[in-house]
Image (spheres, rainbow, N blue to C red):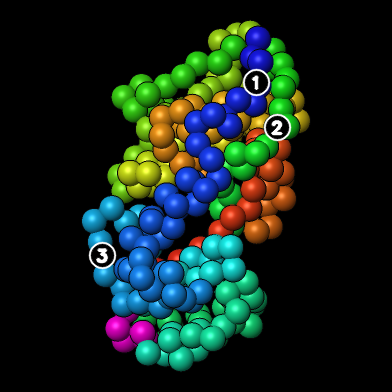
Amino acid sequence: MLRVFCFVKMTMNNKEIDEIVRAQFRLDTNCSEDDEKNRIININAAVRKSGARYFAELDPFFRAIIYHGEMYMSADRQILDWCRQEYGLYKPEWFCKYKNLRELDSKLGAYGYMIHDTHVYCLPDMDFEGYDFEIPYETRWFDTEEIKSFKDGNPFTNALMFIPDCPDVIAVAAYNENGEAVAMAGASSDSETMWQIGIDVIPEYRQKGLAVALVSLLKERILSMGKVPFYGTSESHSNSMDVAIRSGFMPAFTEVFCSKRVS
């Protein structure tokens, strides 16, 4: 039997989470603290910095992070002046309008790159008091080494990614009466301070509250470890966004990534 309560308010507050996240975004986009204090829009030269979040399939040629009406952007020097001219006075909250993304993709294409994806990300709402429920399933926790046992024939590809740049560090799974894993929430260490949560539920076990229960449990465990959990999804994935919100997350930032154009 799985019982989930809300008790995370003692571990960290929203202000502390905001400070950690902003420090990460500064690393990701080569932004100084002084610039951040003085500007709503920060556009800097792309520089690979220790501690920044990097992913193998994405390229640092261009990156934009829109967070609470502010923008952190880094761009290769070949397009840096263009980005500053184009976005220096832009309203960050409208950055992902299709017209703008189409023009940006065209500009990137001239240099052999393209927009790889745009994602919405959620952060914990430490004022959330929305869950207290029971799920009749056994749960099991897995650490970094134990997670490796799922690599071959992995049925939980959203929960466990097995990407070297952001290794899977912790997971929790629900098991049915036959001892079969039917749902799993996992977290990858995308940086030292921010761990991303993913969730998978076997189709016949959906609509039973397992996704919300496991994501809630994992969120609380990560917070208790002094890390900031975050939850990413596609703008069109309303079911996933619903899980995030009911698990005590709130939409907080959007990222636009680029990758090399495949010829």
- Residue 77 included in the magenta stretch of the image: yes
Q: Residues within 10 Å of mark 1 (few under 14, many from 20)?
A: some
Q: On the image, numbered disc 3 is attached to which residue?
A: 48
- Residue at the image position 41 percent from the left and 34 percent from the top: 226
Q: What element carries label 2?
A: loop
Q: Is mark 3 on a helix, strand or loop?
A: loop
Q: Position of residue 74 (x, y in %)?
A: 38, 73
- Residue at the image position 58 percent from the left and 49 percent from the top: 122
First in residue order: circle 2 vs circle 3: 3
Query: Considering only vertical position in the picture, is 207 above or below 116?
Result: above
Mark drawn on residue 129? 2
- In the rendered structure, the answer to whether residue 187 lies left or right of residue 244 reads left
First in residue order: circle 1 vs circle 3: 1
Q: On the image, numbered disc 1 is attached to which residue?
A: 4
Q: Are marks 2 and 3 in contact (CB under 8 Å)?
A: no
- Residue at the image position 50 percent from the left and 80 percent from the top: 105
